[in-house]
Image: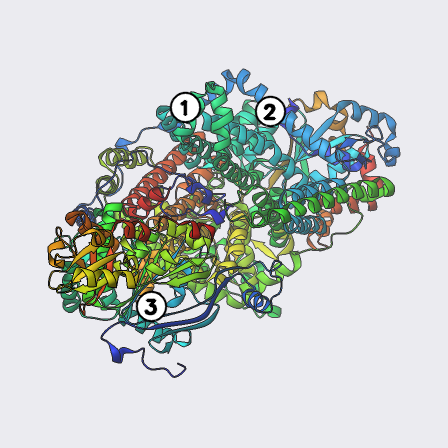
């Protein structure tokens, strides 16, 4: 990564990859001495320094949305600024698209910022003296794109974020939500490979926030950039993040998928957050599903019973074009002479293993029955019934509490 | 000079007064939102009227011959006032004489008691107090100050200045607090107090020196009165603002628990406004010391005397010695009384450590005091009296300064002449011609229109009448001359001070470098560099313009620095993230967003320039200052009052126009205001 | 009435008496030996009667201008003399005649040793002639010479400084018009520049009338104030440039510089006050006092009457300041140390 290519412009399509290793940001005049002391394990009290980011390492895949979640003062805003050297890191390696960011010259840096990176700010960071159109076109203007071209591009993006009709307004004439759409549009106007979002929605009303989160998710599918998303709201992190890093006192406490965070919190700190998390929207059917015995529709009840007992499961899924579930209880008590098909009772929904419990539950309520989890290859993963939902939602068990 | 607390964001921030300059004309008022309606942003249409106005003015200047204000419209306001006043001098004796007597006695008693304390003990006490209140760094500064004062043999005048300051500050503070309390009662009283305070500050102090002397004679008593009039307003403003900005919820809560009005005021409102009041107090001190030195002109004793005396003998070195002593005293007073910005207090970082620090400070202070007292008692002898010190004057700047000035004058004489000609021909002459050749009615209409566009209809009428009044007072030509000097000086400020301010904002190192220089520039008595300027630039408008420029530069630099630094950091980051170069960030973000604060800075610079008019009259700069100086030298009450009123009018009109412009510019940045509200 | 004057006398007195003050603790307990107000015992020559009388009369105050050498020096000298003789004397710093006159008219214990009547005829008219709140104490033994001055090198040149004479026809005023271009400045060209002090002085000197009536090709420019006028002259003198302006002697500038007065047609009473096309009158310099002075401070009054300051003596005093760089009190002290018989004789009343 020491050899410099011209800021990865050759790979325009898709998102950037990020690799951060042992990054530090120490404030104070004696920052380097502080760092030495920390590394040597010495006492740092006498040095009047504060460290906002303490030896953070992580990697982000191209196209991934990486969320850094932490409370205020945890260093998350500093972290995201260190990535693009809005704040100079004190130490460590920041590698974006194979280029050592810390070794970039001013010129390379501003070139890269113009072409490849963009950022959305908590309080929008709009230029109050420019109209919406000029705000959105600002990045292109700075990049030296001609007026006609940049304005047509800006209009395009304005349409994309649903701001059509306000091109000629000033920022102060817009609502908060609209302002942040402008902020988003400005960031997207340059087709960035890396999009940094610093608490983009936390200054907004809850309803508008949800709206914009949904829009961001939709856009991510179209634009496919890599995103680093900063938030203090776990629900938001769980919603938009492919992976989440929980940050505390300048360090990552845990990095993992939303389910990892919710179901397998690394310590009490994370667990306390996870408790309040909207699990229904995080936990997947795959996780919640209980194993079921899968039988063909042509098999006999006795065969099914035998298999059920052998596998020790609690229910049987009868495979076929319209699969259905028979509980173990019922199977045991029915006449053996009947065919399995006769035992179908009501409607049964089928969901993919990635479906969130939220969706599973809605299926469950409409059918009144357990839901079958089946993957794309047609393999039955299991079933989700009311008990499974309760378990999946993590009403904490005695074990967990003890841990 | 709590210059560190330059207003945070927009000029409408209520606590903006921290910035005021010790000798600012109207000073900076916390907030002038008398009509706090929201103007529609930018008003692009009305802007187009301005060039039109200018065009009409120039056209009519060419077409119509008469430009001067007609004598027929003149009203002898001054002589009427003069007659009334002279009657009062006779009939009002019962009123002012007892007050004067009390003041005199108070000052004399205090000074005598100070002289009775052994001098080393006075020094030890002061240094101990400084250490105790503000720590060792400032204690060291106090030590340096006393060292300077003793080495230059200025003990007696310093003692006089200290006594003068104690009385002046105590009385100004009392007056300011009372006015502030009065102003906080309701919006009507607020408006009344604010108007009074505006006049107190915008009316040139030199112009009210004459009436005060007529009543009280010269000396410290008159100087005290003049100083109180000058120094009370900042505290009055800040008290009123502080009290009114106490959250109504808090007051309601107190009332709900059954607190009486008095309890609410003393138990809730005053403590909660204390930060603001302390800032006002600091300003009052700085105003008082500026005036205390100026008041040497009317017989006040103290450090102003060696300064004036040195200048009178053309012994600039002597004057500078006194000036430096003044700077020491002023900076000490400022730092001691400065408000520490909340949150940035380092000692709050580690509370245990700060406690330990306090103990160390107290111990040192006690040891110092006791040690000095003991030494004084033990040694007795001549060491107790610094007034007639047992050593000869150690430091003398007279020789070096003399040689420096002579060297500069003889070596660079031609360059100075060329510079003088440059300013004269490119600035003063064309502007002078412009201001005197535009017909008076066009000026009246133009000012009114400008105010209509920037401020509002009522303000337009007031401003128009104001301009008319200047003519009616017979000050038309003088005002035009003053304006020519001020405009040229402000032009220089924009060309020189503004870029320096930009430079300050871009580098912490440059900022750290400039700040002490600005501190010194603003604490040195202005006249200290006015008279030497004559050596290089001769008397007349050019020297006056340059002196005005020098005096008006510091606020412009400070405000520029503050304006550009305090821009919403996210907008700057957004721009940087977009890949903007430093130049682009400056021109596309910082300057446009800082414009409201920049306007406040410009306004301050203009008002300070106005305040310089009388000082520069001492070196032959023409205009309203000459009228006031004349009145001071000839006791011509009439001319002084007319000149003073004209200055007041000019200052108020300029002030309102600038504030209107600033307010209009600030509406576009109210995204950030909204955000502040949201966060609160 | 003396309450109107906050003089520095109290402190000066304290200084002279070398008060011993002790302070115990931070509570600022004063153990000042105030009673120890001995007068140093050097006033023996004048006898204790005078000292007693002066003590009884109380403090007198002399108006002292730091900017005006002759004025400040005399005030300092007499304050010291009175104190040495056993009395109390203070100094009131002044910067301006009008201010000074108002103060004197309100008090009864003030005196000034150097009042230039022509600089302030309106003050004279109001306070001395009309209100009679200020009275004439006497006139000085030296005479004032006001007028238009040029550096002598303008006339004679200065080989040492390599300056050519630029207007050798001076000091005769008739040469002025030929030299107009010499004295012209950017502001006044092609006319010559004549520099006046402040606008407020001009009416009493009749300079505009003088220029008009002698048909001088000159323009009057105001320096703005006395220090500014001095600074203008000093700047020109340092550079060796021609300069023409108002100046007077005795004074600080004429003491340190070689200046020559322009010779106008001789003074006459008809000319002064009308055409002003003539030289200044020989200036009688007045000593003034508050009107109650003689009655309430008879001893001090008599001492002031005895006081003499002939031209040479003043020059000697001034040279201490100008040549030796002393301040006023030191210069006064030095002279007193060297001439005890002179000033002690003043106290013989």
Q: Residue furthest bottom?
A: A3
Are the residues tagged 1 and 3 within 8 Å (C-beta)?
no
Q: Chain of mark 2?
A: C
Q: Residues within 10 Å of mark 2 (few under 14, many from 20)?
A: many
- Residue labelled with disc 3: B581
Foreground mark, 3 or 2, reads 3
Label 2 residue SS: helix
Q: How is the image coloured?
A: rainbow
Label 3 residue SS: loop
- Residue labelled with disc 1: B185
Q: Residues within 10 Å of mark 1 (few under 14, many from 20)?
A: few
Q: Residue sitting at 36 percent across and 44 percent down?
A: B679
Return the disc, 1 or 3, that comes first in the chain's sequence. 1
Distance in Å between CA atoms under marks 1 and 2: 42 Å
Foreground mark, 1 or 2, reads 1
Q: Chain of mark 1?
A: B
- Residue labelled with disc 2: C106
Q: Position of residue A302 (x, y in %)?
A: 20, 61
């Amino acid at each position: 990564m020491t050899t410099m290519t011209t800021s990865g412009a050759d790979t325009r399509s898709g998102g950037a990859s990020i690799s951060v290793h042992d990054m530090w940001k120490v404030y104070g005049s004696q920052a380097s001495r502080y760092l030495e002391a920390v590394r040597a394990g010495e006492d740092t009290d006498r040095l009047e320094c504060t460290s906002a980011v303490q030896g953070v390492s992580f990697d982000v895949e191209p196209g991934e949305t990486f969320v850094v979640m932490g409370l205020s003062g945890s260093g998350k805003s500093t972290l995201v600024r260190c990535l693009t050297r809005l704040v100079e890191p004190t130490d460590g390696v920041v590698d974006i698209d194979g280029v050592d960011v810390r070794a970039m010259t001013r010129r390379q840096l501003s070139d890269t910022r113009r072409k490849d990176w963009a950022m959305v700010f908590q309080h929008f960071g709009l230029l109050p003296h420019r109209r919406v159109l000029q705000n959105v076109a600002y990045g292109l203007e700075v990049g030296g794109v001609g007026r006609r071209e940049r304005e047509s591009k800006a209009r395009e993006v304005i349409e994309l974020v649903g701001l059509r009709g306000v091109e000629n307004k000033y920022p102060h004439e817009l609502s908060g939500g609209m302002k942040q759409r402008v902020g988003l549009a400005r960031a997207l106007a340059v087709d960035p490979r890396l999009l940094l979002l610093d608490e983009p929605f936390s200054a907004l009303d809850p309803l508008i926030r949800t709206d914009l989160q949904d829009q961001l998710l939709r856009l991510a599918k179209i634009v496919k950039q890599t995103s680093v998303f900063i938030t203090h709201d776990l629900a938001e992190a769980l919603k938009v993040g492919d992976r989440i890093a929980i940050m505390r006192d300048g360090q990552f406490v845990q990095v993992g998928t939303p389910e990892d965070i919710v179901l397998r919190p690394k310590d009490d700190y994370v667990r306390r957050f996870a408790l309040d998390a909207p699990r229904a929207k995080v936990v997947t059917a795959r996780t919640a599903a209980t194993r079921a015995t899968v039988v063909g529709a042509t098999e006999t009840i006795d065969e099914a019973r035998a298999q059920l007992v052998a596998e020790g499961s609690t229910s049987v899924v009868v495979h076929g074009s319209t699969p259905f579930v028979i509980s173990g209880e019922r199977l045991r008590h029915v006449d053996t002479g009947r065919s399995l098909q006769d035992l179908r009772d009501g409607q049964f929904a089928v969901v993919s293993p990635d479906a969130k419990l939220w969706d599973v539950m809605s299926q469950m309520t409409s059918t009144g029955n357990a839901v079958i989890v089946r993957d794309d290859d047609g393999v039955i993963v299991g079933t989700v019934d009311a008990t499974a939902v309760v378990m999946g939602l993590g009403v904490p068990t005695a074990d967990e509490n003890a841990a | 000079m709590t210059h560190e607390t330059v207003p945070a964001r927009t000029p409408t921030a209520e606590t903006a007064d921290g910035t005021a300059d010790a000798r600012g004309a109207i000073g900076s008022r916390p907030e002038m939102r008398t009509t706090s309606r929201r103007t529609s942003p930018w008003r692009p249409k009305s802007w187009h009227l301005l060039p039109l106005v200018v065009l009409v003015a120039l056209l009519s200047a060419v077409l119509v011959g008469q430009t001067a204000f007609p004598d027929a419209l003149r009203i002898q306001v001054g002589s009427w006032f003069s007659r009334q006043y002279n009657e009062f001098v006779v009939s009002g004796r019962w009123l002012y004489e007892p007050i004067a007597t009390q003041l005199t006695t108070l000052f004399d008693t205090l000074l005598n008691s100070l002289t009775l304390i052994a001098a080393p003990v006075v020094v030890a006490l002061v240094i101990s107090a400084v250490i105790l209140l503000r720590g060792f760094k400032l204690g060291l500064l106090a030590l340096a100050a006393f060292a300077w004062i003793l080495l230059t043999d200025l003990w007696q005048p310093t003692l006089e200045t200290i006594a003068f300051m104690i009385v002046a500050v105590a009385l100004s503070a009392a007056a300011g607090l009372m006015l502030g309390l009065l102003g906080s009662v309701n919006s009507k009283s607020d408006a009344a107090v604010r108007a009074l305070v505006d006049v107190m500050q915008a009316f040139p102090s030199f112009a009210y020196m004459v009436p005060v002397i007529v009543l009280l004679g010269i000396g410290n008593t008159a100087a005290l009165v003049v100083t109180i009039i000058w120094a009370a307003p900042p505290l009055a403003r800040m008290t009123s603002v502080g009290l009114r900005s106490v959250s109504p919820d808090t007051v309601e809560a107190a009332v709900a628990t059954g607190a009486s009005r008095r309890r609410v005021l003393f138990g809730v409102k005053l403590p909660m406004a204390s930060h603001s009041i302390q800032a006002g107090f600091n300003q009052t001190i700085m105003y008082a010391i500026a005036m205390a030195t100026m008041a040497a002109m009317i017989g006040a004793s103290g450090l102003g005397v060696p300064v004036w005396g040195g200048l009178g003998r053309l012994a600039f070195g002597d004057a500078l010695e006194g000036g430096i002593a003044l700077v020491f005293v002023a900076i000490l007073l400022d730092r001691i009384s400065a408000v520490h910005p909340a949150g940035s207090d380092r000692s709050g970082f580690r509370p245990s450590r700060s406690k330990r620090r306090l103990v160390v400070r107290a111990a040192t202070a006690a040891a110092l005091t006791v040690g000095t007292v003991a030494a004084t008692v033990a040694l007795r002898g001549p060491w107790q009296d610094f007034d007639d010190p047992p050593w000869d004057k150690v430091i003398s700047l007279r020789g070096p300064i003399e040689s420096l000035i002579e060297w500069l004058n003889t070596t660079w004489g031609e360059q100075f002449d060329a510079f003088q000609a440059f300013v004269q021909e490119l600035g003063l002459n064309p502007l002078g011609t412009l201001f005197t050749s535009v017909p008076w009615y066009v000026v009246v209409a133009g000012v009114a229109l400008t105010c209509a566009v920037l401020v509002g209809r009522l303000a337009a009428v007031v401003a128009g009448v104001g301009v008319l009044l200047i003519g009616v007072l017979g000050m038309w030509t003088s005002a035009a001359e003053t304006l020519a000097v001020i405009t040229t000086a402000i032009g220089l400020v924009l060309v020189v001070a503004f870029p320096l301010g930009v430079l300050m904002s871009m580098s912490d190192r440059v900022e750290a470098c400039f700040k002490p220089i600005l501190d010194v520039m603003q604490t040195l008595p202005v006249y200290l560099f006015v008279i030497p300027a004559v050596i290089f630039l001769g008397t007349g408008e050019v020297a006056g313009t340059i002196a005005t420029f020098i005096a008006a530069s510091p606020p412009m630099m400070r405000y520029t620095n503050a304006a550009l630094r305090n821009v919403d950091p996210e907008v700057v980051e957004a721009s940087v993230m977009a890949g903007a170069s430093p130049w682009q960030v400056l021109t596309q973000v910082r300057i446009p967003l800082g414009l409201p604060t920049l306007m406040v800075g410009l306004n301050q610079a203009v008002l300070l320039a106005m305040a310089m008019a009388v000082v520069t009259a001492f070196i032959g700069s023409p205009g309203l200052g000459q009228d006031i100086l004349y009145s001071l030298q000839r006791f011509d009450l009439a001319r002084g009052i007319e000149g003073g009123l004209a200055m007041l009018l000019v200052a108020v009109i300029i002030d309102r126009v600038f504030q209107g412009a600033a307010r209009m510019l600030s509406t576009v940045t109210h995204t950030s205001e909204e955000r502040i509200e949201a966060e609160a | 009435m003396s309450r109107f004057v906050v003089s520095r006398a109290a402190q000066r007195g304290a200084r002279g008496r070398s008060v011993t003050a002790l302070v115990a603790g931070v509570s600022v307990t004063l153990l000042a030996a105030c009673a120890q107000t001995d007068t140093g015992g050097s006033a023996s020559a004048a006898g204790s009667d005078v000292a007693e009388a002066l003590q009884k009369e109380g403090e007198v105050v002399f108006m002292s201008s730091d900017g005006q050498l002759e004025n400040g020096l005399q005030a300092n000298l007499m304050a010291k003399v009175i104190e040495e003789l056993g009395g109390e004397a203070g100094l009131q710093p002044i910067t301006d005649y009008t201010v000074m006159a108002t103060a004197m008219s309100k008090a009864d214990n003030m005196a000034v040793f150097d009042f230039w009547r022509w600089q302030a005829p309106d003050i004279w008219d109001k306070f001395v002639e009309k209100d009679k709140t200020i009275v004439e104490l006497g006139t000085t033994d030296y005479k004032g010479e006001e007028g238009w001055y040029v550096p002598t090198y303008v006339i004679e040149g200065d080989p040492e400084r390599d300056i050519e004479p630029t207007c050798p026809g001076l000091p005769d005023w008739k040469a002025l018009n030929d030299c107009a271009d010499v004295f012209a400045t950017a502001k006044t060209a092609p006319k010559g520049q004549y520099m006046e002090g402040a606008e407020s002085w001009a009416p009493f000197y009749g300079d505009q009338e003088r220029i008009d009536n002698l048909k001088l090709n000159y323009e009057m420019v105001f320096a703005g104030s006395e220090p500014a006028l001095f600074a203008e002259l000093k700047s020109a003198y340092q550079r060796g440039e021609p300069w023409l302006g108002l100046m007077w002697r005795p004074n600080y500038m004429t003491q340190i510089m070689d200046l020559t007065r322009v010779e106008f047609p001789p003074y006459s009473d008809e000319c002064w006050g009308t055409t002003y096309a003539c030289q200044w009158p020989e200036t009688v310099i007045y000593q003034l006092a508050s009107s109650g002075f003689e009655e309430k401070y008879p001893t001090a009054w008599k001492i002031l009457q005895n006081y003499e300051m002939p031209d040479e003596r003043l020059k000697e005093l001034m040279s201490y300041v100008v040549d030796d760089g002393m301040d006023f009190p030191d210069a006064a002290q030095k002279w007193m140390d060297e001439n005890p018989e002179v000033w002690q004789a003043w106290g013989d009343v």
